[in-house]
Image (tube, grey):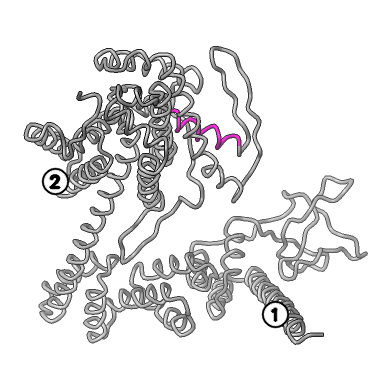
Amino acid sequence: MSCGRLIRKVLMVAGIGAFAFASQKAAAQEETVRSKIAAAIVMPDEEGRIAVVLDLKKTPSPEIVGWLDKWKEGLIFIYEAEDGSIVPVLMGDPIEGTRKIAIRKLSDDTPVVDGTGNQVGVTKFELDLADTSSSLRKAMREVSDLAALADPDVEKRIKAIENSSVGQRQDKLPGLIELQKIETNSKANKALEQAIAIINLRSDDKAKRLAAAEFLGNRGSLPAFDLLKTIALESKKSGDKEMEKAALLAVSRIELHISRINAAGTLFRGVSSGSVLLVVAIGLAITFGLMGIINMAHGEFIAVGAYTTYVVQNVFASGLRLSPFGQSFEIPGLGLTGTGMSLYFVVALPLSFLVAALVGLLLERSVIQFLYRRPLESLLATWGVSLVMQQLFRLTFGPNNVQVSSPLWLSGNWTVNDVVFGWNRLFVIGFAVLIIVATWLVLNKTSLGLLIRSVMQNRNMAACMGVRTERVNMLTFSFGCGLAGLAGAFLSQISNVGPSLGQNYIVDAFMTVVVGGVGNILGTVISALGIGMADQSLQQYLGNPVIGKILVLIGIILFLQWRPQGLFVTRSRSLD
């Protein structure tokens, strides 16, 4: 046997042994918890039960929380054995051939048997609950709070640590200090330091109170902000100038930290808002900016992408029943859950592009091809198309909004120094960058892009050179509509999906394209980010989103009065 194979075998045996040892240890720990809770239940007096429960604080573990919860929820019962002893029991499985249920001992999970060795069966109504009192539940809560600090799940452990500082109870300090000695996770250690400092703000030792105030101020502790203001007020009333000064200094430092958080949050929200605008407007920059078609149905292509995402989600789940024009039919589902279900959005993205592009192709062949160089007619025709499409959405999916759930990998957030970055907002930023790069590559590095640019600059010359302008128009319009479908797929993750989804964004999309310069992709990018940043900044500092949007609109109007051609001027056939 080679040395490498021998090492692998040794590691495998060691791993199996370690797993078995850990399993045995966990089982033994749970059995100990069960036996102690059983002992507490059979104590003849309440003081004894409370004493046994509080004794569990010496060995905190996640198992304690679960079994105490079962006790409080009425899942543990009292059985009086034939010898008169009291046995805490749990309900087991139904006994075959009878209407009774087997019971198992709480202490060791063994079946309860009678004097002849037969399994005991009872009905639920024959047993008494292991009751609790308010004093006993209070003791349980103390033990559960401490036991939660030993939870193997880091997020749950951190949450329990943060909750332990509520009320600034000094009796929780020893457990937190002991946990600090063995905690290895850096985030949990920071939470422990903060919780200990918050509790020390109510310490009898003034030196500890001063040190805690200084630590929390330097840390920029948000949970301690209100408490420090209260302590500053109390110290002022009591004449403790030193403590008042320390608390006020900590408050000022936390306020500075909050201002930095707000600034970073505003910047992030501005970039994400601009990215949403960009995703919505990039398709319009193709159809309106490059082709000169005032497509008032652009918002409905966004809705096409959103509804495509909704259908794909239901296909991955339990299926979908639709009733267009009174004809009901059912789309079967795959019945996926968990990770498999989360992949639905990966499939929905390309499908939303393809479906919206195909619908755009149909619209271009049936209506748009007759309206080139006729902006007023194209505006009216596409407005009518938008009304028809909205009604089709209502007939097919109903007039109410439909529910589209975010996949697991887009849920939650990422927190950096108290600044919260939502995963869905981070995704739209990356998504917008990807769309811009892909659009630029298509327009500048492909034969289709070359044809689009040639037709845009001079249609007649391109036709004389053999370019099939009708086919280029068809593909360009389909591409722009497909990009709108991609926008709808993402918007389904951050807003409601309904027949009027697109109408909420159509005005903003036109403003973005016009401000950036009709037909200029770079101008659309700069315009979207600028409008998004201005909107979020004004909302943050004015405290009123409506006034903020009004000021942004006024700013756009004034800008267009000064520079009606937008940030960048692009020559297109619509301006010839």
Image quarter in which the C terminus is found: top left
Mark 2 and mark 1 lie on one chain; the one further toward the N terminus is: 1
- Is residue 286 or residue 470 the one in the foreground? 470
**Label drawn at residue 455:** none
Please identify the quarter of the rendering in which residue 6 is found: bottom right
Q: Secondary structure at mark 2?
A: helix
Q: Which residue is mark 1?
A: 18
* Three-letter amino acid code at the position of disc 2: Leu
Residue at image x 24%, y 34%?
513
Determine whether the residue tagged by mark 1 lies in a helix, strand or loop.
helix
Query: Which residue is depicted at the point 31% across and 77% down?
Result: 197
Residue 17, above or below 544: below
The answer to whether residue 545 is magenta is no
x, y percent for residue 410: 46, 50
Along the line of sight, which residue is nearer the eye, 175 or 561? 561
Instruction: Report how far apart the C-alphas of labels 2 and 1 lie in the structure.
Output: 60 Å
- Residue that extends furthest to the left in the rendered view of this protein: 562
Q: Which residues are magenta?
A: 303-315
Mark 2 Cα-neighbour bin, 10 Å: few <14, some 14–19, many ≥20: few
Q: In the image, what residue type sits under mark 1?
A: Ala
| Disc on res. 542 | 2
Q: Residue at x 27, y 30 (%)?
A: 457
Above or below for 474 versus 334: above
- How many numbered discs? 2
Q: Position of residue 426 (x, y in %)?
A: 37, 52
Quarter of the picture holding the N terminus = bottom right
Closest to the observer: 206 or 286? 286
Q: Residue 271 at what x, y percent from top left?
A: 27, 50
